[in-house]
Image: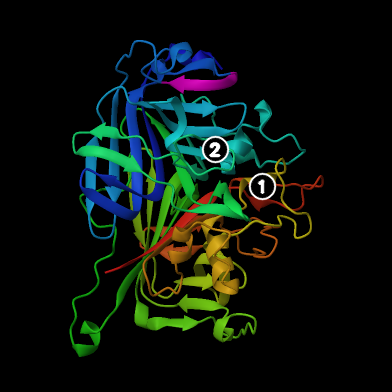
Amino acid sequence: MLAPLANAAPITYTAFTITDGSLGSWQFHNARVYITLETDTSNAQFATIQGVRVVYVGPFPAQQLCTGPATSIGTARVTIITAEKSARATFVPNQLIVSIDLDNGGVGFSSCGPNGFEPAYPLGISDGTIDAATDPFGAIPDTHNPSPELAGLSIDIMHDTAFSGRASVCVGFPTGGKPCSPPNPLHTDKGVLLLLQPYQKLTPNPPSPPDFGDTLSGGWFYAVVGGESVSEDASSSPHIPLLAAADASERERRPITYTGFVIADVQIGANLFFGAQVYLLLDADARNVMPLPNRTCPSLPNGVCGYINDGGRAKAKVISGNQTITAHFTPNQIYAFFDIAKASVGFGSHIGGQDYRAYPLTLTQHDLADGVTPCFVGNACSLTENSLIGAVADIQSTGDTANYTPETATLTVDLKSATTLSGPASSCTNFDPISSVCSSPAVVALQTDQGSFYLFEPYTDDDSTSGTQPFSVNWGGFWANVD
């Protein structure tokens, strides 16, 4: 593992989540926040910090965290994107640390505050693929069956790699059931940056305050060797421009753009990309949202099981290292859906007369990975339980808001309103939304102007000893912007 130290090269680390906060006087909500550090692989070192084995990149000596002499190791930036506004700022040097926890499973950006080292602020990512990938170092004590792609993820942060999981934006982490402390200021050339953790699981404990459990938001981390990583461009809109309104009907449009995000393997034409950033976008009209057809759910409000928007123009944006490919789908292949009863949201497809509800991308809750055995700390399905999609589906089904922070109850998924969600991500044509098992990973071709499009499900695990019940431990995001 020490061999890469001899071959120094430029590297860019990026972490991404959707959260609230402020930059200078601008307060943002449900913003896509990208944090990057451009540095060199020679700055990475294996160390033991507070009894934990890590790979560490930071301005301080690993054994003198937040107290030793600081040395500039590169340039760190933040990019913040909302539907209304975007901004990019450069951090004052020597504030951010990048590390991967080889013992407990975690990766992201840390910092130093008044109380010392903050491992999950501004953004730490745990569970998901990062926890499963570090299992040889003791993250998951139980027997499990990771896919070859999951087992093969590089965990030395000196090579190209990418992870997903649960995003923590928390001062005082771990909090032991208490809320996070107020965020520490991070200084940039655009003013002070403060980031919050708005969506979290609660356990009522009357008459005492509730216990704070898992954060519900997804987070993503990727490292690109050889130059600057490409992410969303803060200077341009992520939307697909709608056609100009030609008549009164067109002018009455209610434009809405649905976006899905996942780190996965993808093929477009003859080009195959591993661990790429994949954006799926559907530009649609909110007036076309309908209840899910051919189903009724008497226990849900109005008996409606969920919603579907089966129209609009769709495209895929794939980012792999320094390369970006955009492909426009043939019309009438992709639709957006939200299934309340099955706690799933994402993009389905019409292919060859078949309706694939979970392909190319669906986010679901993973409370029962095999449909029988409950999740608990130590088995693989615990890496993906407690997510925003599960929380929102629970609230819309039962009205149960006491088990979540108040901000969680403000999220809606009627496919007509702006929203943001995250959760376990699958791309499976024979997906079981109840157990989250993908018994066969076969995919089918979607047609684009760049050739056939395939989105794979590379990062799976299995709590069974037989290896016959694989499910994704990958996390994805889904958001809707109203124009």
* In this view, 122 is above or below 416: above
Residue 235's x, y, as percent?
A: 20, 50
Q: Is residue 444 visible?
A: no
Going by the image, does 453 lie left or right of 377?
A: left
Image quadrant assignment for residue 296: bottom right
Considering every residue shown, the one lying at the far right of the view is: 466
Task: Tell me, yes or no, whether the two marked residues, 2 and 1, touch with CB atoms within 8 Å.
Answer: no
Residue 275's x, y, as percent?
A: 49, 42
Q: Amino acid at mark 1?
A: Ser
Which residue in the structure is indicated by mark 2? 175
Residue 305's x, y, as percent?
A: 58, 79
* In this view, 420 is above or below 458: below
What secondary structure is marked by label 2? loop
Which residue in the structure is indicated by mark 1? 382
The C terminus: image quadrant: bottom left
Going by the image, does 91 lie left or right of 263?
A: left
Residue 34's x, y, as percent?
A: 34, 42
* Residue drawn at x 59%, y 21% as measured from the top left: 52
Q: Which residues are magenta?
A: 51-57
| Residue 55 magenta | yes
Looking at the picture, tell me which residue is in the foreground, 274 or 357.
357
* Residue drawn at x 52%, y 58% as measured from the top left: 388
Q: Amino acid at mark 2?
A: Thr
Going by the image, does 90 lie left or right of 453?
A: left
Looking at the picture, tell me which residue is in the foreground, 165 or 312.
165
What secondary structure is marked by label 1? helix
Image quadrant assignment for residue 420: bottom left
Q: Main secondary structure of the magenta part?
A: strand
| Residue 140 magenta | no
Looking at the picture, tell me which residue is in the foreground, 166 or 186.
186
Considering every residue shown, the one lying at the far front of the view is: 207
